[in-house]
Image (spheres, rainbow, N blue to C red):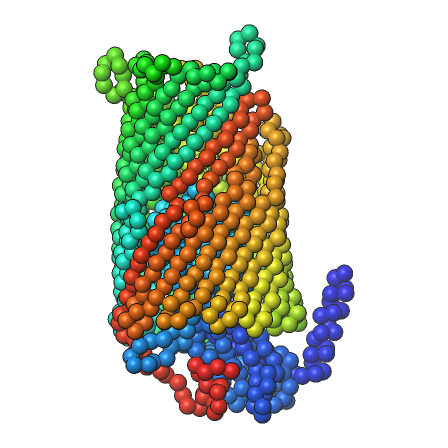
Amino acid sequence: MKQLLLLFSLLTLHFSTVLAQGKITGKLQDATTKQPVGFATAALLASSDSSIVASALVEGDGSFVLTPVAEGRYHLKISFVGYSTRVMPNIQVTAAAPAVNLGVIALRSASTLLKAVEVVGQRAQVEYGLDRRVYNVGQDLSTVGGTAVDVMQNVPSVTVDQEGTVSMRGTSNITILIDGKPSALSGMGLDQIPASTIERVEVITNPSSKYDPSGTGGVLNIILKKEKQRGLNGVASVNAGMGNRYNTSLNLNYRFGKLNLFTNYDFRQDYRKGIGSLFRTSYDKTESEQDTTFFLDQQSSNSNQRGNHNVRFGADYQLTDKQSFTGSVLYRYGYREGNGTTFYRFLEENRSLNSTSTRTTRGDETSRLFEYTLGYRMTFDKPGRELTADAVFNQEEERGQDDFRQMFYNAEGRETPDRNDLQKNQGLEKEREFSLQVDYVHPFSEKGKWEAGYRSTFERNDEDVQATEFNRASGRYENSIGRTNHFVYDEWVHAVYGNYGDAIGKFSYQLGSRLEQTNIVTNQITQGKRNNIDYLNLFPSLFLTYEFSQEQKVQTSYSRRIDRPWTGQLNPFRDISDPLNIREGNPNLRPEFINSYEVNYLHFWKETTATVGIFYRRMTDVVQSIRNPFVTDNGENATLSTFQNIASGESYGLELTGTANLFKWWRLNANVSGFNYRIDATEQGLASNSRLSWTSRLNTNFTLPYKTEVQLSLNYRSPTVTVQGERSSFFMTSLSARKEVLGGKGNIILRVQDLFNTMRFNSNTFIENQLEETSRYKPQSQLVFVGFSYRFGNTAQKREREEEDIPAGPDREGGEY
């Protein structure tokens, strides 16, 4: 097989040489930011009749190669949504100079001036590369007034559950980056990041060795907005929703000379409530070995109000033409107030009432965060060669308190004071994280390059919970032994990586490897227990690409990944917020390892783009939440949930993604992902479980008269399995509309989330001969938002172009071909 592939490659090269010796290369770059512009279209036109001689899809790093090219004179046309079309005339290929390198080609944003009003070309909502999909948030009306959680609801390959947990292709073990780097913003929870600050989301399902291998599902890279125009520019917005929900934001940018200053402020307050129910059947044996059955009927309601203030200041400075610095400071203040009530009915074997109980929970929390970032970038004369270095430091402090009161009543409704339970918790959590990363990229040919880098991170999580319980004898709250816990988690990760890639004819490849040393220390200060975990691991990656034509490509890839247990899984603190559904961590967890394989096919048409992906993941030491039933001191049937490493798991599936411009007034993008997730826990005495699941989403946009746009979003997730049961499906539809006002500078937006009030989350748990349970939860998901945004600043940008670069006829910058 290898000999046949080699022969095929040699024949391809031979015939290319016979037919034409020439080739044209170059690299695209944003004229303002100097960043590469990938996935554009490069078309070579004959100078005589403007017919297309050759075309190419630009690589992710901005580079392109047009070959084979016969001797002659040509025009090169570069086009990409969101940028002005660029035409470079009079490109000559001769026998003496068959290889023409055009160097760096600058592209400018697609803007034209009309009565001092800027008209900006609209970027596609979803853009494609073989190794990633890019979701442009600015085109998604359904996220207005929302958070990053609302954004993720519409990102291809991504699903979000009722707790805001993000999953990709059935797994929540993913790495979330902010502007390509770890950040405290991603650690706070995606519901704390305003959608208005996000420019785009990059979905990388099988990352190379350059990326942190943490997470089985891949990488989500959230890119924040930054203004590129000179002078003072800004956007102000205000949004209000039903039920005491509102947010405001202000983004300012001032660019002059070599200095760019930027700042943004965001205030958000959100109020949510929900109702739930649970019915549990517990199977027990009495002392005489007789089988008995008990039932628990539980109804609950909760409300949660939270808010935050985010302030960010930063600056970019162009030290020289090839060197720049970026620095920023982020401050965040957040608060939370929550209330919950749960009503329990304890039933005998014949389902007659034994007793009841009412439990109320009240809690509040405040948090303060500082994050400091510093970045350096150096480019060289050779296009694509660059050196970057980034340092990030953040520290956060959270203080909270919770009050639990549980009252018991007999079957006749009389209170039983001796069983009542009054508890209070005081919590203080401190987090610190530092990361340093250096990357170097060195191209040695049009498609060949090697890259290397180093990354070091340190993370400390210090969680101190002081728990008290009311003592009836003394009449005061006293320390609750077994619930009070001080836990400190330290993690160091040091990594080096290298990647090498090149092309042979239509084949291209990239192989790389990453070596990581991990050191973890867990310290249970309350119990005086300290645990050290050290491991050294190698994470290889391989990418192979074959280009059928400029419009069609197929790529196969492999990578090895790791999922390290996080502090909530390791912390042995016993959470008794619900005494009949107790949770605690496991400090002896091992990391989970994953071998990930993918095959992706990409095809471009004139108005349509489609990708087909097949993926397979094999996991070992899978971490799962395991529930075990037990009987409390008061005789109630309860469960204890903790985390364990089970033997193995696997996931495989098919994913289809596409976009289409059906008409000038109608465009849509869709994503369907089907996968089978199988968990094998027989070595732990648990049953295996598997199920075919699938997710789908559809966004369709309609451009109406009077500068109005309407968007309809549909999101569905089928049932999924756990090691002890399954979670139900959910479906949600959202409708949004936007109307331009004030000459295009302002927008009025209306958004209705969960239009038909269908979002709900149900789950079933089954433990043979021990427990059966069905739970349901309905969040307050049907919401209405009204918003207004206004853009102001310097819109009269100077158009810098040379007349000799503009050919006659329609093929000029900003025109259409």
Q: Quadrant of residue 239?
A: bottom left
The residue nearer to you, when weighing 737 against 45, is 737
Give the x, y percent position of residue 370. Answer: 29, 50
Give the x, y percent position of residue 180. Answer: 43, 58
Q: Residue furthest left?
A: 475
Q: Indicate the quadrant containing the N terminus: top left, top right, bottom left or bottom right.
A: bottom right
The residue nearer to you, when weighing 546 against 458, is 546
| Image position of 118 with respect to 485: above or below | below
- Count of residue discs: 0
Image side of residue 618 versus residue 203, left or right: right
Kindly identify the residue that appears in the image at 59 percent across and 83 percent down.
52
Q: Quadrant of residue 550?
A: bottom right
The residue nearer to you, when weighing 636 against 86, is 636
| Image position of 435 with respect to 476: above or below | below
Q: Is residue 790 something one can see in this rendering?
A: yes
Image side of residue 616 versus residue 696, left or right: right
Kindly identify the residue that appears in the image at 34 percent across and 70 percent down.
228
Q: Residue furthest top?
A: 288
The residue nearer to you, when weighing 30 against 195, is 195
Kindly identify the residue that appears in the image at 32 percent across and 40 percent down.
304
Kindly identify the residue that appears in the image at 69 percent across and 79 percent down.
16
Q: Is residue 212 something one can see in this rendering?
A: no
Q: Quadrant of residue 234?
A: bottom left
Give the x, y percent position of residue 198. Answer: 38, 59
| Image position of 625 with respect to 650: above or below | above
Give the x, y percent position of residue 670. Answer: 53, 59
Image side of residue 785 versus residue 509, left or right: left
